[in-house]
Amino acid sequence: MQILQKMFKLGEKPEGSTYKAVFVAAFAAFGGILYGFDTGTISGILTMPEVEVIFNDGNAFSSGKSSLITSILSAGTFVGAITAPYLSDTIGRRIGMLIGCGIFCVGITVQTAGMSIATLCVGRVIAGLGVGVISSIVPLYQSEAAPTWIRGAVVCCYQWAITIGLLLAACVDYGVQNRTDSGAYRIPIALQYAWAMILFIGMFLLPETPRFRVKQDRLEDAKKSLAFLRGLPVDHPAVESELAEIRANYEYECSFGSSTFADCFKKGGSQRKRMFTGIGLQALQQLSGVNFIFYYGTSFFKNIGIANSFIITVILNVVNVVMTIPGIMFVEISGRRKLLLAGAAGMCISELVVAIVGCITNSAVGNKILLAFSCTFIASFAASWGPVAWVVVGEIYPLRVRAKAVALSSASNWLFNFGIAFATPYMVDSGPGNADLKSKVFFIWGGFAFVAFFFTYFFVYETKGLTLEQVDELYDNVTLAHLSSKFVPQAQFNDKRFVAELEKAEDENVEHKV
């Protein structure tokens, strides 16, 4: 831990132990395994000969069937993400994830037992509901549990877990691709029970976040949770001080009334700007085209004449896993904005090269160039937009609307995920009614990466090194995103200025509800 502190240039060691908080927040990232493994599994399953025999009378899946089976998961995740706040804001972040795991297991059971496209789709919708709930709550739980100095790196671990899930799925698909029984699809699908149970057991044993306990007005439980996470006695001054700041900030926000989804877009202040940032980041993360590779990569490389498409998918997944590590390391060193800007530039250049090469040649040399720049695209995404988009979304919203705002941002991710998964076969494949773009589709993804660069410059604030309470002060005092890196917090929410404002609001009979 001391090495990490020196790496992030912390100077004096924070009071208490940081091991527990980092472990708790990082373990929650295991939820990404569920998302990544399910995403990666379906890509290989739909190209397996035995699966085509069982589900499609031995024929290759049409664009319509492939589109439906792949994208239907995202329809479920969209609904799950939208409904997640009703769980996380009422019964807790931790219990919400436990329920998400249970829903996911029901979906896996239906998929494993099914032997028709209809049953497979129903199972994927149910599993998607669980994944949507988990994907919405994990960044919320991590941001509220992790210490400020390593919060970004810890939240990045969620994306890293997604990449590991994708890699595991590619390896499992490679191992079972030539099976001549139902194990070709049942083994990779049923393996997802293991990831769900590990997350379930871990979250059953780990504590609720102190910020949610404050929201419940259970201050003693909040103090115990915070003391556990910081490795300090319950009555330690550092625990008392941090709890006082969390409580004062929440009470100040609640002096303006209770929160609804409509409050996420209320007029005045910075709330609309924050929502536009979060939703835009999650949408552009999907519009980069990364899930085109992981949903349809195996069939895409096969269709353009590249042999050993399963091996190519494994290689791309290895790049994805390895290159997420620099993102975890540098998010607290270089900051959020610089990583997103550099990543958008790298993705744009790589994707345009892939598109151009695909247009002018289909030779062996051309295919090698295409694969090389597919790797640089994945590397650019993995080190930047993959993890950092989740970091920003997890930390830019006020506590009063945080669960709902994170849910809406996650829902944006799943909505665009669904759209891309559904439309891509029609865009890429040949045949009647299809666009037959093949590698030219990368012109579209590269164009959105170009947009992502300027979106970051004008709308993404630098939140490195700030507490979640200080992020509110940042948005209240800095109007231009490119000036945010120069911001220096002036006060804590437990100081006299904020207490006075709270008392004034109460005196004016503004609705006050904790």
Image (cartoon, helix red, strand yellow):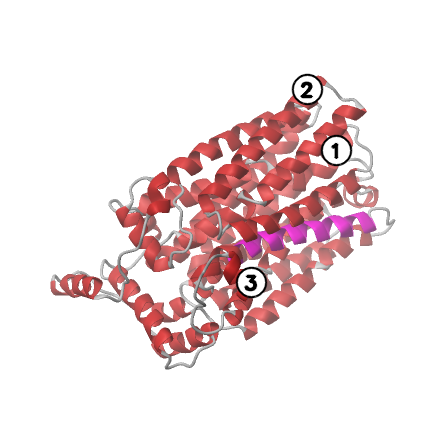
Residue drawn 26% across and 65% down? 251
Disc number lying in front (3 or 1)? 3
Image x and y of residue 36, in percent:
64, 51
Q: CA distance from mark 2 to mark 3?
A: 48 Å
Pick whichever, 488 or 268, lies toward us. Answer: 488
Residue drawn 40% across and 67% down? 212
Q: Which mark is residue 301?
A: 1
Q: Is residue 354 visible?
A: yes
Image x and y of residue 215, in percent:
35, 67
Q: Which mark is residue 359?
A: 2
N-terminal of the pair, mark 2 or mark 1, is: 1
In the rendered image, which residue does mark 3 sit on? 3
Q: Residues within 10 Å of mark 3 (few under 14, many from 20)?
A: few
Left or right, residue 463 beside residue 509: right
N-terminal of the pair, mark 2 or mark 3, is: 3
Which stretch is magenta? 154-176
Image x and y of residue 244, in percent:
30, 71
Image x and y of residue 158, in percent:
56, 55
